[in-house]
Amino acid sequence: MSQTIRVRGLEKSYKELKVLRGVDFEVARGSIFALLGSNGAGKTTVVRILSTLLKADAGTGVVNGFDVAAQPAKVRESISLTGQFAAVDEILTGRENLVMVARLRHLKDAGKIADDLLERFSLTDAGARRVATYSGGMRRRLDIAMSLIGNPPVIFLDEPTTGLDPQARLEVWASVRELASQGTTVLLTTQYLDEAEQLADRIAILHEGKIIVNGTLTELKQLLPPAKVEYIEKQPTLEDVFLTLVGADSKDPR
Ligand SMILES: Nc1ncnc2c1ncn2[C@@H]1O[C@H](COP(=O)(O)OP(=O)(O)OP(=O)(O)O)[C@@H](O)[C@H]1O
Ligand SMILES: [Mg+2]
């Protein structure tokens, strides 16, 4: 069984608003899976159900072999969740934040764990500085590092780079790739097509409560025929695929 996450027929409504109408997907161990969707598509709802923070109305979710409804404690031991708002303490240094979390989790060698993570996320030089002085990208990296303490096999990243500048996004992307290369299974949500394009082994588009496509970037691009402009073949971008499938009219009007 190489699927670390299995979701079948997931449904969820908030009062009369039907957000999820039968969501199905699987995520292979050690891979990066991007759940792509417009504002309000239900991405965070899926992540909250899989991280046991919210109950589904119907359907099943299995994470690391445990059912999210029947074995929530086991699921929680298997995951870490990083949301858009970093949970770092500004007054402490980066290293102190990491040491604090390692101690809270009753791990031995909290200092060594902190130093290893600082190095892995290119924060060694910044480790002794208060987080208040960090850039957005450094904070996000520290937040991801903190969520890795205890080596959870599965990590959920809900819009990991929203609000970051291009350089900071590249830094976070590098950290996420590094995670997956070490065997962590990553489920990330994003509204950024380039993020999915750059990072994900598989991309699924959540639209009107269902997964309307799910495949590798190459598979998704094959859904649209390449356009021939003069003698140069123009391959469709993921944005073309997304807008064709979702409909340009449902794009956020901001
Ligand atoms: N607790 C709640 N009560 C009522 N409605 C909710 C609740 N949480 C989410 N919703 C609604 O459910 C829909 C899906 O929300 P969700 O946060 O899952 O979307 P999303 O894809 O994560 O969006 P975004 O890209 O803006 O983060 C939205 O219309 C939202 O307003
Ligand atoms: Mg969201």
Image (spheres, rainbow, N blue to C red):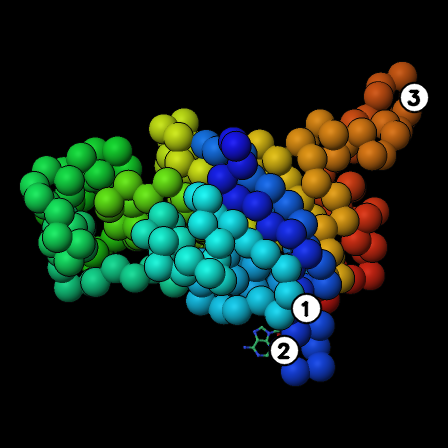
Where disc 1 sits, the SS reads strand
Q: Is mark 2 within 8 Å of ligand 1?
A: yes
Which amino acid lies under the numbered mark 3 shown in the image of this protein?
Glu
x, y percent for residue 233: 84, 21
x, y percent for residue 52: 45, 62
**Which numbered marker is on residue 19?**
1
For mark 2, what is the residue? 14
Q: Are marks 1 and 2 in contact (CB under 8 Å)?
A: yes
Near mark 3 (Cα within 10 A), the count class, few <14, some 14-19 or many ≥20, is few
Q: Quadrant of ligand 1?
A: bottom right
Q: Is mark 1 within 8 Å of ligand 1?
A: yes
**What is the spatial separation of the Cα atoms under label 1 and label 2, in whole angstroms?**
7 Å
Q: Residue furthest front?
A: 70
x, y percent for residue 139: 30, 52
For mark 3, what is the residue? 230
Q: Residue furthest top?
A: 231
**What is the spatial separation of the Cα atoms under label 3 and label 1, in whole angstroms?**
44 Å
The answer to which of 50 and 238 lies nearer the viewer is 50
